[in-house]
Image (cartoon, rainbow, N blue to C red):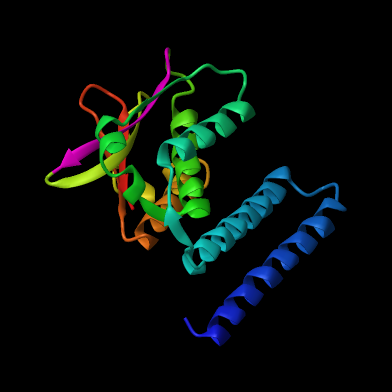
Amino acid sequence: MESNEKSIIESFIHDFKGELRDLKLNLEKDNNVEGSILFQIEMMNEMLLAVEEYYFFYHMELKKKSVNLPLLVKSCFQKVKERNQNRTVEFNIILNNFKKSNESDLIGDDDSIKKALSLLIENAWKFTKDVPNATITFGEEDIKGEHFFYLYNNGPNLPHEVNIFDLFYGKRSGHERAGLGIGLPLAKLIFEKHGGRLWAKNNDEGGVTFYFKF
């Protein structure tokens, strides 16, 4: 993207956020304004913030180095757990082949990979909320000659295994815990920027597995 075009988009996002903020402040002065209108304005602002974050990661320059994946995963899970201390979730890491072979060969941008892992774990945490004995497992699997890492959770199956990676799919889906739908598209973007992939599969026995490589 040309620098001038990039500057125009950044300016638009910044100015639009300012206009929404001013509109909300003016409406809040009117006690007759319905709460639903203020809520819609807040949702628009959240969508702009999401686009801004997606845009940032889309254009960020990756600083690749050796990645300690097990350590990153543990750190991400711990941070999610600290924000939700009222729940107990069993968390497992199964990386037998990885530890023996390619641990030192895994290269990526620490900050962005950590962001993607956090988004996947937060998604798993959210959708196992009503599941007895909630479980999240991080592991690895060879599929058709390709080596993937995966994050499994024993929550409900996905209604759509592909559309969940569309920007703002969560808002359109109507699911009460879906949110806006920025996390999974952003995680997918990050892995693809590394030359990898992210995809999801419903398990026949229940639960969902997110496969990724970078």
Percent position of residue 87, x then y: 56, 18
- Residue at image point 70% right, 72% down: 15
Quarter residue 128 falls in: top left
Seen in the image, is 5 located left or right of residue 185?
right
Q: Pinpoint residue 3: horizontal percent, then vertical percent.
A: 55, 84
Q: Farthest left residue? A: 144
Q: Main secondary structure of the magenta part?
A: strand
Q: Looking at the picture, does residue 55 appear above or below residue 12?
A: above
Compared to 44, does 209 lie above or below?
A: above
Quick one: 132 or 43, which is closer to the camera? 132
Residue at figure coordinates x 60%, y 60% from the top left: 48
Q: Is residue 65 visible?
A: yes
Q: Could you say where residue 83 lies in the image, as x and y percent from the top left?
A: 63, 30
Is 156 or 154 nearer to us in this picture?
A: 154
Q: Is residue 177 visible?
A: no
- Please state which of residues 156 and 150 is positioned toward the viewer in this rendering: 150
The residue nearer to you, when weighing 87 against 107, is 107
- On the image, the x and y values in percent for residue 129 come to 49, 23
Q: Which residue does the image show at 69% across and 64% down from the upper left?
A: 17
* For residue 30, side relative to residue 55 (left or right): right
Q: Residue at x 37, y 46 (%)?
A: 164
Answer whether residue 157 is magenta in the image.
Answer: no
Please tell me whether residue 142 belongs to the stretch shown in magenta. Answer: yes
Instruction: Report how many numbered discs are placed on residues in the image.
Output: 0
Q: Which residues are magenta?
A: 133-143
